[in-house]
């Protein structure tokens, strides 16, 4: 069995945002030369997410509104976590909802997606560099 481990760094300039990382992951799958296997993509920060969905701007705006309704950023005093001097309790909650990682099958050397599926990095407390782990295993 072969494997490839890579780390990608993202620095979203806004507090929140979604980045389509599918092309970067596809390049790594090609680099791995794995034809049949699995690709793990894992956000390595507790206020960031990796998820799969449609690459459609309206949906991304809907996510933003939905997440903000579930865990509004303000007032920051509503969260006990923010008593530590932080102001990002909402980002932790949003990450929990959106998920930590995805695993995609590799078939014939390509990510084996369903229709419209793409991989996204979700940032909920941006403006600093954060890492993503990509681990590809197989033959």
Image (cartoon, rainbow, N blue to C red):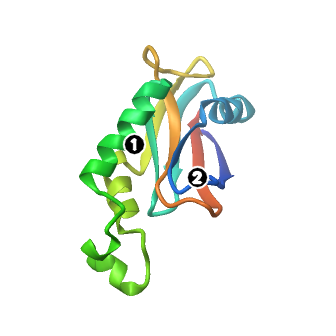
Asked whether disc 2 touches disc 1, contact meaning CB atoms under 8 Å apart, the reply is no
Quadrant the C terminus occupies: top right
Q: Is residue 52 above or below residue 128?
A: above
Residue 31 percent location from the top left of the image: 74, 34
Of all residues, the one furthest to the top in this rendering is 115
Of all residues, the one furthest to the bottom in this rendering is 84
Label count reads 2
Residue 12 percent location from the top left of the image: 62, 52
**Local SS, label 1:** helix
Quadrant the N terminus occupies: top right
Query: Quick one: label 2, few (<14), some, or many (20+) residues within 10 Å?
Result: some
**Local SS, label 2:** strand
Point out which mark residue 133 bears: 2
* 110 or 47: nearer the viewer: 47
Q: Is residue 120 above or below residue 87?
A: above
* 35 or 121: nearer the viewer: 121
Q: How far apart are marks 2 and 1 (CA)?
A: 24 Å
N-terminal of the pair, mark 2 or mark 1, is: 1
Residue under the point 43% across and 84% down: 85
Residue 18 percent location from the top left of the image: 52, 41
Q: Name the residue under label 1.
A: 64
Residue under the point 36% across and 61% down: 73
Q: In this view, does 2 lie above or below 53?
A: below
Q: Is residue 76 left or right of residue 33?
A: left
């Amino acid at each position: 069995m072969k494997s490839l481990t890579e780390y990608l760094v993202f620095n979203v300039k806004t507090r929140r945002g979604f980045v389509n990382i599918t092309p970067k992951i596809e390049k790594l799958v090609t680099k791995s030369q794995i034809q049949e296997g699995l690709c793990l993509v894992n956000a390595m920060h507790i206020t960031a997410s990796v998820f799969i969905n449609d690459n459609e701007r309206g949906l991304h705006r809907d996510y933003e509104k939905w997440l903000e309704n579930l865990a509004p950023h303000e007032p920051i005093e509503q969260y006990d976590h923010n008593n530590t001097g932080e102001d990002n309790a909402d980002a932790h909650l949003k990450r929990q909802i959106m998920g930590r990682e995805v695993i995609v099958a590799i078939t014939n050397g390509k990510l084996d997606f369903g229709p419209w599926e793409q991989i996204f990095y979700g940032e909920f407390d941006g403006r600093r560099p954060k890492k993503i782990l990509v681990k590809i295993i197989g033959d």
